[in-house]
Image (cartoon, rainbow, N blue to C red):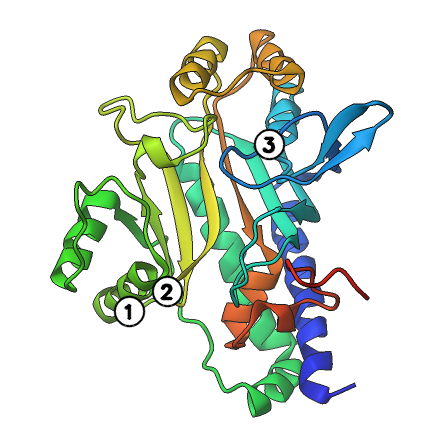
Amino acid sequence: RAPAQNAVMRVQSAVCQLYRESLYSLGFVEIHTPKLIAGESESGAGVFTTDYFGTTACLAQSPQLYKQMAISSDLDRVFEIGPVFRAENSNTRRHLCEFTGLDLEMAIEDHYLETLEVIHGTFKHIFNGLESRYAKELEAVREQYPSEPVTITDEPCILHWPEAMEILKGEGFDMGDEMGDLTGAMELALGAAVKEKYGTDFFMLDKYPSSIRPFYTMPDPDDPRFSNSYDIFLRGQEVCSGAQRCHDPDLVLKILEEKGIEAGDGLKTYIESFRHGVSPHAGAGFGLERVVTLYLGLDNVRKASMFPRDPNRCTP
């Protein structure tokens, strides 16, 4: 009943409404994918398992494989808002074991930059809509958790991996071979540098190393050490991960072998769907609670969830 916390829940609802508005206006179709699946959907992410009539099923870590299968079904632009489960024993202020995922996937004509433009436009609609249509709720939250409106550029602000490495080395970080993932401290430092250089709280980092991205990520055709993948940052923290997907079934099998991942029944169906023809496509997914937390300047992601689930909490 506290005014600020009540307003946080209303802002969370507003983000979903504005997300839907933006994507519906761009010809997207909302889909609903299964949350009980036969195998992992995100390599590297912990998975909850359960008995499924004598076999083992998993709680979905994302709708990733099903979004792509929708593209192969000639649904050229799809999105989903639904629960995501991660069995990661992370007791931090930015991680949850269950959160609401906002996902999108779309066929591309010439380049995956088309998807980055859609994502940028969608976030811009969300940010502008919150400030213009939910001023009362924002005022209630900001009385308790002071924050400024997010600054966002008119066009996408896109950094490439080498530029980010140079910025971070300039900030005093040892980047080693420059092929490792970013730490939280690196993200914050990069965000501060981008804000100073480009004047934006919202930017995209493109061309991540292939070794730290999931198997379904398209390698960079000019240098397969890197990939056509990106993360998106808000106030110096990652809120969204995406990529051009690998739509060549034989290349998917090759990458699975290189990463030591067995193509189980779930993956076989996924790969087979591409053999019937699929458009080149790209997409992204972001966590609702994390976006709300960072937009509102909250100090813990649990404050953006009505009933948070973390390694120590499964009730109420």
Crowd class of label 1 (few under 14; some 14 to 19; many from 20; radius 10 Å) = some
Q: Secondary structure at mark 1?
A: helix
Q: Secondary structure at mark 2?
A: loop
Q: CA distance from mark 1 to mark 3?
A: 33 Å
Task: Please provide percent x and percent y for residue 222.
Answer: 23, 23
Q: Residue at x 56, y 53 (%)?
A: 89
Task: Please provide percent x and percent y for residue 28.
Answer: 64, 39
The amino acid sitting under disc 1 is Ala
The amino acid sitting under disc 2 is Gly
Q: Is there any visible trace of residue 33 in the rendered image? A: no
Residue 229 lies, with reference to residue 189, above or below; the image says: above
Q: Earlier in the sequence, mark 2 or mark 3?
A: 3
Task: Please provide percent x and percent y for residue 152.
Answer: 40, 65
Where residue 303 sits, quadrant-wise, is bottom right
Crowd class of label 3 (few under 14; some 14 to 19; many from 20; radius 10 Å) = many
Labelled pair 2, 3 in contact (Cβ < 8 Å): no
Q: Earlier in the sequence, mark 1 or mark 3?
A: 3
Q: 299 or 222, which is in the foreground?
A: 299
Q: CA distance from mark 2 to mark 3?
A: 27 Å
Task: Please provide percent x and percent y for residue 75.
Answer: 66, 27
Q: CA distance from mark 1 to mark 2?
A: 6 Å
Labelled pair 1, 2 in contact (Cβ < 8 Å): yes
Crowd class of label 2 (few under 14; some 14 to 19; many from 20; radius 10 Å) = many
The amino acid sitting under disc 3 is Ser
